[in-house]
Image (cartoon, coloured by chain):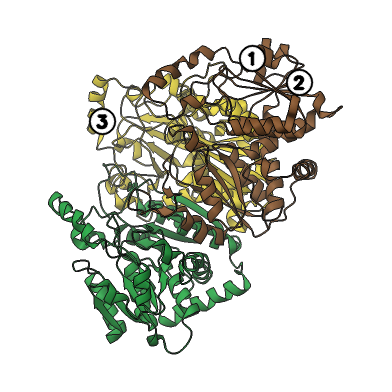
Chain colours: A yellow, B green, C brown
Amino acid sequence: MRGRSILSLEDLATDEIEALLDLTAHFADAGIEPNLAGRFVCGLFFNPSLRTRTAIQVATESLGAHCVIHDVGGGVWKLETEAGVVMDGDKAEHIRDAIGKFLSGVVDCIGVRAFPDLSNPYEENRQDRVLHAVVEAATVPIVNLESALFHPMQALADLFVLRNHLKGGQRADHTIALTWAYHPKALPMSVPNSALLAFCRAGYRVKLAHPEGFDLDAEIMTRARELAGDRLTVHHDLDEGVTGARVIYAKSWGARWEYAAAPDVLAQRSARGDWREWIIDGRRQALADPGAFMHCLPVRRNVVVTDEVIDGPHSWVAEQARSRVLTQAAVLHEIVA
Amino acid sequence: MRGRSILSLEDLATDEIEALLDLTAHFADAGIEPNLAGRFVCGLFFNPSLRTRTAIQVATESLGAHCVIHDVGGGVWKLETEAGVVMDGDKAEHIRDAIGKFLSGVVDCIGVRAFPDLSNPYEENRQDRVLHAVVEAATVPIVNLESALFHPMQALADLFVLRNHLKGGQRADHTIALTWAYHPKALPMSVPNSALLAFCRAGYRVKLAHPEGFDLDAEIMTRARELAGDRLTVHHDLDEGVTGARVIYAKSWGARWEYAAAPDVLAQRSARGDWREWIIDGRRQALADPGAFMHCLPVRRNVVVTDEVIDGPHSWVAEQARSRVLTQAAVLHEIVA
Amino acid sequence: MRGRSILSLEDLATDEIEALLDLTAHFADAGIEPNLAGRFVCGLFFNPSLRTRTAIQVATESLGAHCVIHDVGGGVWKLETEAGVVMDGDKAEHIRDAIGKFLSGVVDCIGVRAFPDLSNPYEENRQDRVLHAVVEAATVPIVNLESALFHPMQALADLFVLRNHLKGGQRADHTIALTWAYHPKALPMSVPNSALLAFCRAGYRVKLAHPEGFDLDAEIMTRARELAGDRLTVHHDLDEGVTGARVIYAKSWGARWEYAAAPDVLAQRSARGDWREWIIDGRRQALADPGAFMHCLPVRRNVVVTDEVIDGPHSWVAEQARSRVLTQAAVLHEIVA
């Protein structure tokens, strides 16, 4: 994978993903192998981060390399991404110069977190313009650290946790309920998109559950069905969604009608409260079998999941979060030339 | 001390403090011993910092370890600390998840700076909820880098400076004047609390001087009297407080009536100006013997202390500040497993 | 140069500059020599930065040293710089304490980026008070990472690029057009000041072109004429300025009448639009011979320069930006004791 960018796990062949998970397992047992002495990895953050920022630094430095962290303004897009623009507005630099002419030449890999907020229309949002502008400008491998559409580093850690726990039988013997949850804010779809495709491709049975109107991206759904066939089912009732599942993977996201919402739609948004019942609690965990709980964090306690479940014996949340360092290290180990 | 948290020097036995000071002296002579290769120390800052932030990074990296610095929003508490809360407000993550499920598993020690501002009532403020929530969630040692009540890393550096200078005779032969000073803003009591207990326990004679109404915490005072007996005296006149002291340790702090102050109390606060005379100048230094000057920095010049005193031959301020790296290194050397 | 500060290339003898460029060339060929193991370099940023911040970290760590980065508030001067002031205002610490009593004692070199915005009068602005207060307080070498008057690290990288490309004949055979360009905002003069003096001293022929009213600093111009004699000419027409030049070095800056501008002057400022024609495009590049393009970045595309020119075969912009790491490493290699 030397020199390759990873914007989505879809950029990798199935055996490449398995190889990354094997390397992660090796790192978990034997420690991270420092094969990148003298290299530099840059983490470029357009959005705040705790886990990802920690993971990229700890992984990079454990590999013997150096980590340069840059915050690109708090929520403000200071870098121009469109080609050919007359830059007489508020953007002081073009991403072609910042990344292409400069950063690409002085570091060996760039991790980019750039998910737009939901104030833009969905169709614009899903184009992930910043990420793609970085990729187009760069001459070094780019790792997507979460964009509007994908969060591949999270999905890789999730696959690692699933692989550690679900060992017996065929993968299709294990059912994962990927469930929407209530949250007071409309959030990006990157995590459910990446989880859905990763779990379908890995061979698990997937029950996707969300309220009507909260459909995931149409292209993503088409691809998921292509990967999973009848291993994928969709449910609009949470009880039905979790029943019989080995794992409940909860995550909230915004509906497409919430993007760039006009005031009258915002009024409708307050109707979100109708779905307050979409929470993973002890009763729902009992409907599953035995209902291990997964979430990418950060999580709203007693909104998305009750304390009882997230702190209970079947919570894999800590393992997911901590695996982020190991999977990040495996990725950098393989792609940095 | 392997694996121990240090929230206050009160968490350490007297001989443990002396051992840390011995190790600091060794580092001062022979350089910091890099015994933490491959380890990670996180500095988690809820408040701004120059000295502490520099000290934790320089100490950590001098020990051969890596340092991860996180700023948790500018003055905004983004992490929920209360247990059992329904998190549908403005806090996106619980400290039990950020620290307990994640950070504890990927770093080897966490330093936390989290002092609330004085807009909350004193009784709430002194509970140091963020710090204690971190400790409760963490599975790695926590170092308090300044909370509402304590600043143990500062007190340790202060003890080191005192020990270097006050060598002859018994410790009780040396008098330290710990004096309140005027400052336009009401500040936390962490530094005077930690200094008072540390100096009393170390065996020095302590003259605590502050205006009426600026009493330190009642529990702290009780403990100080228990430690010092008649080596501790309290004065409400600055001239009287500094007279005959070997060392003047100045620091401003807010009175308890200034916490969560209502508008009419704020009017009273402007009456702070009544205490503008509480400044360490050449005349007061001359009342002492010979009146070495100490302050933890940052300091308001010509408000807390005159240029003449802080830049004079008896100023130990630079030594205090620079010792912060050495004492921090000694602490990490001992507690990181 | 051990222990020396570099506030401007004027602080260095001509043969010292050549020695730094020789060392840079050696680093470019053979890699950066890690001679600073265990040392600490601090980057103190009063203004935002991408290239300089990356360069100081990558250079420092490539030298085997550690890099401590501090941001001193977003545009707010939190450090007092004046001597003797009664500090009862909004500044919590004096630079004599932050730098002199503390930072100087715990790091081996400090890089400072501190250019004031143009809201102050020009005569005050050009005094570079923060930078000089840091130098006065410090006991370790200071590197100017851009102040109101100078940007020596940029000029050194520029000289390196020129030296790589302009090899034949005498230096006076090569003409560099240093040209003002239109920009919607009034910017500091640091880059053109440093470039002008550096190019004049290096022996190149320099055509300085800017609209009437945009003169550079009078002292700088006097020094440039002293260095260059009749190798320096001044032009108020851009076509005339670039004609026959081997290199076009474009940079916008504010006119002195734009500093601390009153509302009626601001109205005049909008008259800046009169100079929108000051842009480097293909036609102007063709007037030069063959018109290599240089700019320090960040640059407003299609305002300062067209895409065609900056992305064309004669653009040296990427080489300039990337050389910043190498020249920075050469400087630290030589001055850190």
Residue positioned 45% across, 60% down in the render = B110
The amino acid at mark 3 is Arg
**Residue farthest toward the top in the current orientation of the protein:** C283
* Picture layout, residue A22 above or below residue A221: below
Q: Are marks 1 and 2 on the same chain?
A: yes
Q: Which labelled disc corresponds to residue C246?
A: 2
Which part of the image, by quadrant, shows the C terminus of chain A?
top right
Chain at tag 3 = A
Chain at tag 2 = C
For the question of whether residue C226 can be seen, the reply is: yes
Relative to the observer, which residue lies in front, A205 or A37? Answer: A37
CA distance for labels 2 and 3: 64 Å
Estimate how packed mark 3 is, as few (under 14), some (14 to 19) or many (20 or more) residues with alpha carbons within 10 Å: some
For the question of whether residue A169 can be seen, the reply is: no
- Reading the image, the residue beneath label 1 is C238
The amino acid at mark 1 is Leu
Q: Which labelled disc corresponds to residue A272?
A: 3
